[in-house]
Amino acid sequence: MKVLLIHNRYQTAGGEETAIAAQMALLKQRGHTVLLHQRDSNEIPTMGALARARAVPRVIYNGHEAQRLADLVAEQRPDIAHIHNVFPLISPAVYRKLHQIGLPIVQTIHNFRFLCPNSFFFTQGQICERCKWGNTWHAVPRRCFRGSALASATYAAAIALHRQWGTFELIDRYITLTRFAADKLVEGGLVAHERIRVLGNFIADPLPAVGDLDAREPSLLYIGRISEEKGVPLLIEAMAHLPPIPLHLLGEGPARAALEARVAAAGWSHIRFQGYVAGDEKFDEMRRASVAVVPSRLYENFPFAILENLAVGTPVVVPRHGAFPHIVAEGVHGRSFAPHDSHDLARTLVQMLDDPALPTMRRHARTLVEQRYSSAAHYDCLRGIYDDLIAARQGKAALRRGVTP
């Protein structure tokens, strides 16, 4: 099978880039040919003033990019197109072009961009779903996209116009990472449930080694961006209500300096900001931790911080909103707390650390990844999606030719 992957890279790489790279490697390992049509948002800072001005309307419709893609399809003749992100340099124009060509289209939903101009359902410090039903202009006065009225208006126009034009209806199959995201697409009137498949992120083979499943020194771990929307200030506030349990924070972000200063002023030597940590060192930290914490104020989609901790047998405490309850089963793979509530977070952390069922949760966490989020499980589901769409498209083509498939 020849698969065309289409992606506009973000200026700052995150979980989406990790997921795409893993999926591309998996397809190649299974013997498929992978064609990559990719643009990079880091091209934008290198553009001159005129090129940047031209790039603004192309967020809405980039006919030149659509034709480039059509030329690639004509030359390489892929069996299916799998799209991850088209903003800002590729644009939704490619959906219409691929549909005209007759190539089956799969779209993985990594965020809520088709329903929300800033993609997070979060603005001005709180959850917001005002634009979900199609009136995306709520984003402009609030400057929801990076604090810019122009950028917010551009994305609001792109989403509103393509919904009006029926562009997103040309996608043959949507893949969401959780049932929560699927429900949001349906609630917003974007797509019917029967055109959605749920397929989460996965951990590439070989799975990381597990930590001690029976006993670990009491400690907490946070991995991710050190920022307000990720809930790190909330976590530090919760730590004020706890005994001096070690907390290690791995990552960088705009809130680090202020939070580090607060921790130092309070004399909390048990809280350590360790900066960006990757590879074996990161997994060693996960294996040592009793409990991982993901205190995000966002709905999120499928954070790798959860998946990787579960893979090494570390249960996770998550907020009781968004995608989190769809990933972490209460009392099975971790526990949840009331969103934005530092007191309930503190209570939940104490409950977790004192829970005699913690070793059982560790085993359940690892088993969940082995059974549902392994390379094999991901490939089987993805291959089934591809096969169904290719067969359906071939059947339609045969009927048009008057041939019984």
Image (cartoon, rainbow, N blue to C red):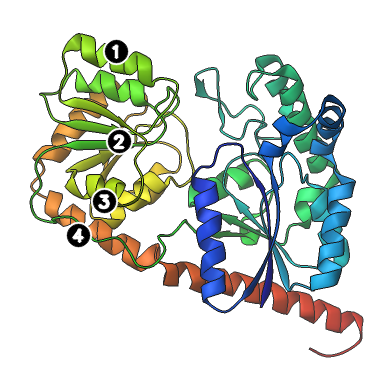
Instruction: Check disc 4 and report its element: helix, strand or loop.
Output: helix
Dot 3: few (<14), some (14–19), or many (≥20) neighbours within 10 Å?
Answer: many
> What is the CA distance from the residue labelled 3 to the residue labelled 1?
33 Å
Q: Specify which label sits upstream in the sequence, 2 or 1.
A: 2
The residue tagged 4 is 363
| 122 vs 96: above or below | above
Question: Residue 88 location, x and y as percent?
Answer: 73, 39
Picture residue at 75% right of the left edge, 67% below the top: 104
The residue tagged 2 is 222
Q: Amino acid at mark 1?
A: Ala
Question: Residue 243 location, x and y as percent?
Answer: 10, 24
Picture residue at 82% right of the left edge, 34% below the top: 55
Q: Amino acid at mark 2?
A: Tyr
Q: Specify which label sits upstream in the sequence, 3 or 2.
A: 2
Instruction: Check disc 2 and report its element: helix, strand or loop.
Output: strand
Label 1 vs label 4, nearer the camera: 1
> Would you say residue 330 is visible in this rendering?
no
Label 3 vs label 1, nearer the camera: 1
Q: Specify which label sits upstream in the sequence, 3 or 1.
A: 1
The residue tagged 1 is 261
Label 2 vs label 1, nearer the camera: 1
| Disc on res. 180 | none
Q: Amino acid at mark 4?
A: Arg
| 162 vs 279: above or below | above
